[in-house]
Amino acid sequence: MQREGVPLTLYSFYIFDRHTECIYSKKWTPIPSTAPSSSGNTTSTQQPATSNPPSSQRSSVLSATASSAQAPPQTTTTTTTTTTGPTSHSLSASSALRAQTKATNDAKLIFGTIFSLRRLVRQLGGADDAFLSYRTAEYKLHYFETPSQLKFVLLTDPRTGSMRTVLHQVWATLYVEFVVKNPLAPVEHGGGDGKSGVGNELFEGGLETFMSSIFNIGQPQVLQQHA
């Protein structure tokens, strides 16, 4: 599946249940973007040069300065107000919330794309036709649906070949063994509360080991940590 001497990159992995809810997701490497970086324009502003005032104005200024020097000094009271910025705890909580929101939006976008492509494939090719994958210049999306309508999605390097067998093995040897056959696991992992999902250490470890044997991946970054 991997070309000789060419390391392939694994981007992310998703599982959707039959209710269209994302019950598991993990990200290894961000998808590269070819969008040009926007550089700001620097504007320089020159202050007009100040010319020396005429002699008559200098005399007036000197007279006013002398008068102010003879006047009794006035007491000035200065009030200092200290504003306390957001704490590091609030900043970290805000960053975690933004990351969680982005992960949720990405999952919704991916499922919406799959739903549209599956419908298009069946309209053009018939009811027996099936959507398997699609590729862009930056990534390739692989799709596998189980008989129980679980949907496994894998985003990889666009040079990657078919990952249908890989997704089938993830379902049959990892998901079924560690999640479905787990007596403590619920029948339905989605609850619509944002906290439900696949939270199984054996499944996590098996998935990481299996993907590491195929792709050139490093330390994974978890998108959504389910309870």
Image (cartoon, rainbow, N blue to C red):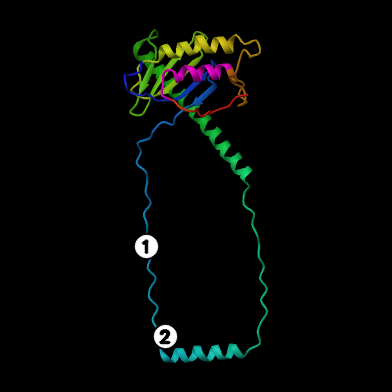
Give residue 33's quadrant in the image. top left
Does the magenta-highlighted stretch encompass residue 213?
yes
Q: Earlier in the sequence, mark 1 or mark 2?
A: 1
The reply to whether residue 210 is visible in this rendering is yes
| 216, 72: nearer the viewer | 216
- Based on the picture, tell me whether residue 215 belongs to the magenta stretch: yes
Of 30 and 7, the residue lying toward us:
7
Q: Which residues are magenta?
A: 202-216
Location of the N terminus (image quadrant) = top left
In this view, the residue in front, 123 or 207, is 207
**Which residue in the structure is indicated by mark 2?**
53
Q: Residue 131, percent across and down? A: 39, 15
For label 2, count other residues whose C-alpha is less than 10 Å away and answer few (under 14), some (14-19) or many (20+).
few
**Mark identifier at residue 14:** none
State the quadrant of the C terminus. Answer: top right
When asked about the image quadrant of residue 203, the answer is top right
Q: Could you say where residue 40 lies in the image, as x and y percent from the top left?
A: 38, 51
On the image, numbered disc 1 is attached to which residue? 44
What kind of residue is marked 1?
Ser
Taking the view exactly as shown, the residue that stands out farthest to the front is 5
Where disc 2 sits, the SS reads: loop
User: What is the x, y in percent for residue 127?
Assistant: 40, 9
Q: Amino acid at mark 2?
A: Pro
Q: Is residue 3 left or right of residue 199?
A: left
Quarter location, residue 166? top left
Residue 57 x, y percent position in the rendering = 45, 89
